[in-house]
Amino acid sequence: MTDTIRLGEIAHARSGDKGNHANVGIIAYSQAGYDYLDRVLTESRVAEYFLPLRPKSVERFALPGILAYNFLLRDVLAGGASKSLRVDSQGKTLGVAALEMTLPRPPNMVDMQPPQRE
Amino acid sequence: MKTIRIGNGAAFWGDNLDAPRLLCEGGGGGGRLDYLTLEYLAELTMSILAHQKSRDPTAGYVSDFPTVVESLIPLLKAQPALRIVTNAGGMNPSGCAHQVATLLQKHGLGKLSLAAVDGDDLLPDLDKHLAAGETFSHFDTGQSIDDVRERIVSANAYLGAKGIVDALADGARIVMTGRVADASLTVGPCMHEFGWPWTDCQRLAAATVAGHIIECGAQATGGIYSDWTESLDLADVGYPIAEISDDGSLVITKPPGTGGTVTVGTVSEQIVYEIGDPVHYLTPDIDADFSQLRLEQEGQDRVRITGARGNAAPASYKVSLAYHDGYLVSGTLVIAGRDAVAKAKAAAEMIFARVRRAGFNLARTNVEFLGAGDSVPGVWPSDSQPWEVVLRVSAHDPSRDAVERLARELAPLVCNGPPGVTGYTGARPQPHRVLDYWPTTIDRSRISPKVTVRTAAEWIR
């Protein structure tokens, strides 16, 4: 067993655009996961992960009732829908990219995983 | 207690054309809708519609909408209580109403009442507003409007639900607006049906949450859901329905027997879609607070939402302004075989060298190797070398000739570039005008919705 996990093992995500800004919503599968993300999924960690896209700033907002953190990445879309030259001009892929982030393995990992499916 | 069912059958201009009809048909025998909403206007759609209207004064509305209305004719006849609220009017709500009226008359529905709601278009009076003290400075950067004043293509305020409520009170069965806040398409029917006071922030917030969740169509019912293997049969995905009651309680569901899924997971993802600070989801109707929302799986494909709250609406309307900002082109080639990325890099360098040799210095350029991680450049974990990549080159420049030259330089690589170049079978990439986005605000006292309600027969008289 490695000493790291993928964010996608304990959370799911959706992203979108607002002009030249993007947001990435990260939703924990469990309360334990949400509490863990409160400590490790900081603004600075997310800013560092997306550093190659050069966000001007990263701000985190909490939605505790749905176990979510919303990250607002300002000026991260290289011009946005109207004039970005990137194939993903609207930040549609930032959510799935965020889920590949590596985090330290929490001791109570088993409490954080999604319920087993058929 | 009274409950109304509002279904949204379009998330953007170009969404699936069958969705509105399937939603109104109710899947395998579900309950009928009271309202069908259709949301068509992305941030920049209005500037495209403004361009169309400048060429043809009868155009400038969302041309998908009359097609959708035609598909709904039997349902409009069979379900006399069904009403439609849409922002398909775009830059020309009256033109849209006229076109829809022509269709309805043809199908014997000349008595059906149609409303056009406008008043959002600020361009004709822009100088008047400037003289009155509005600055229209860029909302994010503070840049002065003077820098782009001569190049403005469209300027529209996001109106709220008020015009829609007035149109429904006047008996309109189809309401066609210009730019309104997306959530207002849902808030309007709620205000009309329940007669809540405009100061009832809690219930206005609940209706706004409902509108936010359903505005992007199937994104609430399994579309783009992270756990995509869970949401079966997306080909037949059911579009979302909000069941809203007089007390402000809210359930999100979809027609029975359709594909997709409505779970705490899918609805949670849509709640966080395209939001900033969840404590202040601003619309012209309400300063809504999403931060304390809670979800509960009430049954199969039924999610109950509680905890919406809010404060009085902001004092200004958001304005979306668009201005002409040069030309943009993107083109692709496929590069296959050993060292695909290195060969693609060499091909891109050739393309730009030839554009320079022709005398053009492109203002902004970008090169991407799709298949080698460039959808999110520099972020994906590095992998082994792919056996093929899509080379995508792009440029933005004030000169149309400059970007056109770039478009011309892709095809020659098939014969004179590195080995393994293919995929050049489509037409040459076409440059398009860049209509750049300029968010700003206007004091709400300066504008008000204008509502025109007439029967179809009257619209075409």
Image (spheres, helix red, strand yellow):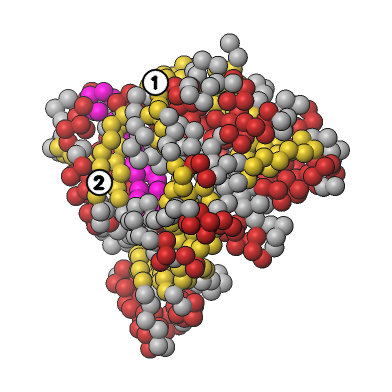
Rounded to the nearest angstrom, the CA distance separating label 1 from label 2 is 27 Å
* Up-down relation of residue A92 to residue B279 (above or below): below
Q: Which residue is mark 2?
A: A58
Report whether B58 appears left or right of B358. right
Report whether B358 appears left or right of B456. left
State which quadrant residue B31 falls in: top right
Q: Which residue is mark 1?
A: B307
Report whether B251 appears left or right of A4. right
Q: Residue at x 42, y 61 (%)?
A: B145
* Up-down relation of residue B406 to residue A73 (above or below): below
Amino acid marked by disc 1: Gly
Q: Nearer the viewer, residue B306 or B72?
A: B306
Report whether B329 appears left or right of B36. left
Q: Is residue B181 magenta?
A: no
Q: Are the two marked residues, 1 and 2, in contact with CB atoms closer than 8 angstroms?
A: no
Which class describes the residues within 10 Å of circle 1: few (<14), some (14-19), or many (20+)? Answer: some
Amino acid marked by disc 2: Val
Disc 2 sits on a residue from what chain?
A: A
Q: Position of residue B79 (x, y in %)?
A: 75, 26
Q: Which residues are magenta?
A: A13-34
Name the dominant secondary structure of the magenta segment: strand
Q: Residue at x 48, y 30 (%)?
A: B208
Q: Is residue A16 magenta?
A: yes
Q: Position of residue B7 (x, y in %)?
A: 59, 31
Q: Residue at x 62, y 53 (%)?
A: B91
Label 1 SS: loop
- Looking at the image, can residue A103 be seen? yes
Label 2 SS: strand
Q: Residue at x 76, y 48 (%)?
A: B98
Disc 1 sits on a residue from what chain?
A: B
Residue at the far top: name it. B1
Q: Position of residue B273 (x, y in %)?
A: 41, 39
